[in-house]
Image (cartoon, rainbow, N blue to C red):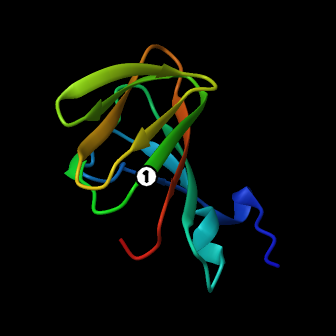
Amino acid sequence: MVIVSEEDVKVDEPPPHGKIGMSTAWRISDAVPVRAFEFRKRALHPGSAIGLHPINHDEIYYVLSGEGIVHSDGEEQTLTEGMAAYLYTGANVGIRQVGAEPLVLIIAYPPGK
């Protein structure tokens, strides 16, 4: 068992895939030496986005708070608190924050991808 405090893995940085705006990342699974999946929390600050990028694995974006627009292969949908987007292998995906509050997400996917 590995116990991880999010405060120990917190970093402010531009979001991945385009560095659009700023975010706070909690790279929770990075503290686990041997793992079967990645588990991360990220707050996209107002105006920020994880830019469009192809994925070679399934991936999940789960919204803890805020509002965002998720993109997958040309389709866009609004996500709010308590909603999840399950994204499929081979899709071109991304998500952008909208509204006044940060978009806080849990992101999970297989490691090494």
Placement of 41 over or under 84, stated as above or below? below
Q: Residue furthest top?
A: 99
Q: Position of residue 44 (x, y in %)?
A: 45, 36
Q: Residue furthest bottom?
A: 33
Residue at 36% x, 49% y: name it. 14
- Say which of 105 and 111 sits in front: 111
Residue at 56% x, 56% y: name it. 40
Quarter-of-image position of residue 1 = bottom right
- Whether residue 67 can be seen here: yes
Residue at 27% x, 43% y: name it. 93
Q: Amino acid at mark 1?
A: Glu
Left or right: 97, with 94 as reference point: right
Placement of 31 over or under 97, stated as above or below? below
**Crowding at mark 1 (Cα within 10 Å: few <14, some 14-19, many 20+):** some
Q: Position of residue 72 (x, y in %)?
A: 26, 36
Residue at image mark 1: 59
Q: Position of residue 61 (x, y in %)?
A: 48, 41
Q: Position of residue 37 (x, y in %)?
A: 55, 68
- Say which of 90 and 20 sits in front: 90
Quarter-of-image position of residue 69 = top left
Residue at 40% x, 55% y: name it. 58
Tell me the quadrant of the picture where the C terminus can be found: bottom left
- Say which of 89 and 81 sits in front: 89
- Whether residue 20 can be seen here: no
Quarter-of-image position of residue 90 = bottom left
Placement of 48 over or under 37, stated as above or below? above
Placement of 47 over or under 27, stated as above or below? above
Element type at mark 1: strand
How many numbered discs?
Answer: 1
